[in-house]
Image (spheres, helix red, strand yellow):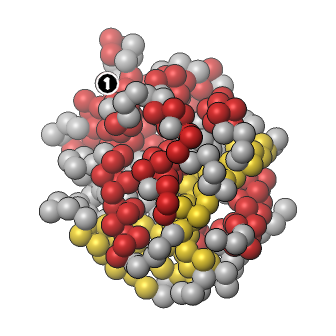
Amino acid sequence: MRDFYPPIEPYNTGWLQVSDLHEIYYEESGNPDGKPVVFLHGGPGGGSIPLYRQFFDPQRWRIVIFDQRGCGKSTPHAELRENTTWDLVGDIEVLRKHLAIEQWVVFGGSWGSTLALAYSQSYRDRCLGLILRGIFMLRHKEIQWFYQQGASYIFPDAWEAFLEPIPASEQDDLMAAYYRRLTSNDAEVRREAASAWSVWEASTSKLYPDVELKEKFSNPDFAEAFARLECHYFVHHGFFDPEDQLLQNIDKIRTIPAAIVQGRYDLVTPMMTAWELHCAWPEAEFVVIPDAGHSAMEPGIREALLNATDRFARMEA
């Protein structure tokens, strides 16, 4: 199995004011004259980490990474106001213009795949290609599977911990119950809910559970932004109307070169959604990793993504 490219440091970092309220952190690394790529992190609210730079050959790529509104180094932290899918789509375009990039490849996994689809369907002419992983479209059946009934049958032990902050009388609608707590004025109530929400996702993200990932996701600062923003977006159905908007608009991006990478045993964003996208968009390369779950860090998914970025780097604009 292939390993990541070696660690690199950014050659440019900064903050960009994208509204009166929000300022986003961004960085550039790799080759300033390379093919531009923008990395869209997951969540919503996951923020970026240095390892994301290592999906790309630093000699070939001009790597742009940013923290979406309300998370990572962007400010204000965990802010829900002025925070919608379409605000983030607008931010990507503002950042592109700020960096004087004409076109770029868009790379996104999990929620990042959602955002990549939404951005490319809004700004098709700015996209040289799409590299997508762990497809997620925020439809009702996807949310219900992971946060109400479905994944709970596979991880009943982790599910018990997820249910702990919610009284039995409210467990018929866990999304609403969590939203009340994650938007509470009581900081302790928010912290308890945020930790349980985040650890549930960390417990189910990999084929083989990762103790270090659970520890990271339970960090109070990370968990508050991650849980609040995820729940905010999910309660509002991703701000899509209709809910299958991304599938309905595939014709807008059909001719963009694209690769879709999906773990067969992904319990966070089950393969059903990636399969539906593949059926609607057979022109896109579709790679199923037979021994992987959701995480981009799992060996098979990592290798497929590295192969995709190498191939796209060689592709003519």
Quarter containing the N terminus: bottom right
Above/below status of 224 relative to 297: above
Residue at the right extreme, as displayed: 1
Q: Position of residue 216 (x, y in %)?
A: 50, 56
Foreground: 16 or 160?
16
Residue at x 27%, y 58% (from the top left corner): 77
In this figure, which residue is indicated by the disc labeled 1? 177
Q: Position of residue 19 (x, y in %)?
A: 20, 62
Callout 1 secondary element: helix
Foreground: 140 or 164?
140
Foreground: 86 or 127?
127
User: How many numbered markers are drawn?
Assistant: 1
Q: Residues within 10 Å of mark 1 (few under 14, many from 20)?
A: some
Q: Amino acid at mark 1?
A: Ala
Foreground: 135 or 314?
314
Above/below status of 279 relative to 315: above
Relative horizontal placement of residue 94, taking residue 147 as reference (left or right): left
Residue at x 36%, y 46% (from the top left corner): 85
Above/below status of 5 relative to 199: below
Task: Give the image quarter of residue 205.
Answer: top right
Relative horizontal placement of residue 277, taking residue 290 as reference (left or right): left
Q: Position of residue 22 (x, y in %)?
A: 23, 61
Q: Is residue 156 visible?
A: no
Quarter containing the C terminus: bottom right
Q: Position of residue 283 (x, y in %)?
A: 72, 45
Residue at x 72%, y 39% (from the top left corner): 282
Task: Give the image quarter of residue 55.
Answer: bottom right
Q: Is residue 14 visible?
A: yes
